[in-house]
Image (spheres, grey):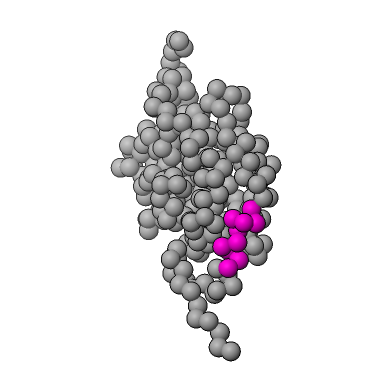
Amino acid sequence: ARAPPPTSDPFGDHVLAPARVQRADSNVSNEPADLVEAFAACAVDDDANEDHCECAVCFDELYKRTQGVLLDDAGRRLCRHVVHLDCLKDLPSYRDNNGAPLCPLCRRASAGVTALPSIFDDARRWFDLVDLDRSGQVAAEDVLATLKAQLPVDEEAIDARWDSLWAHFDHNGSGTLAYDDIAAPERGLVAFLERAGLNKATPKTPRISVSPCKRLTALQWEQDFCGAPAAQPTTTTQL
């Protein structure tokens, strides 16, 4: 008998064989309930004493404000570091280099900055920015690091559960996922995180101004490491 024609994949430019679609569509029915509950438990109370991923500039929790990443001359992601977008724009190197700051962590020179969208709001753009080598695949460590930067989750808790979640989506053990593995309705990673309630857990926290002590420390840190004269010590009263 003639094999059935391939099925177009609405989430990418490639074509999926019917067997691939059938296996992927079975993900939800095969999804252990305790896996969803385990990830739902990673969400933290804003007042709790859990460990969050922090911004390297202001030291506040990354998930509380819009995150930014650095771009190269071709408009691609420069490095894997995630920092608050407004903090990147506050760096002396942002002003000195016409909006193209040095990375405050690896100190690589960028060509500009861009906002890192939520995986729930713009999965396509999110995927493209996490796909550092433009291979059409995202690596497990990069997905984990980005989710920890954007979601209000306890770092140790999600680290402990990550391997079991990744194995649920990475069927061939390649260590990478394609866009349809991330964004496909019902069966993708986005849908899983929504079932775990992590899309609703992000608090709508207004921006809280960073204390002068923290801001001065952050600016001195960059100036010291980038070769510019360090700021003069200033006495600041902490309220």
Q: Residue at x 51, y 45 (%)?
A: 194
Residue 83 placement, left or right of 155: left
Res 220 seen here:
no
Range shown magenta: 22-31
Residue 233 magenta-highlighted: no
Q: Is residue 189 left or right of residue 222?
A: right
Q: Main secondary structure of the magenta part?
A: loop
* Residue 65 on image: x %, y %: 42, 33
Q: Nearer the viewer, residue 178 or 200?
A: 200
Q: Single out the residue that lies furthest toward the left.
A: 98
Residue at 59% in and 55% down: 28
- Whole-percent x and y of residue 226? 46, 37
Instruction: Decide which of 75, 179 is in the foreground and name it.
Output: 179
The reply to whether residue 179 is visible in this rendering is: yes
Q: Relative to 183, say whether 65 is above or below.
A: above
What residue is at 66 percent from the left and 36 percent from the top? 156
Quadrant of the rendered structure where residue 155 is? top right
Q: Is residue 135 above or below residue 197?
A: below
Badge count: 0
Q: Residue furthest bottom?
A: 1
Q: Residue 38's spot in the image, x, y percent?
A: 65, 41
Q: Nearer the viewer, residue 153 or 65?
A: 153
Q: Position of residue 86 (x, y in %)?
A: 38, 34
Q: Residue at x 53, y 35 (%)?
A: 152
Which quadrant does the C terminus fall into?
top left
The quadrant the N terminus occupies is bottom right
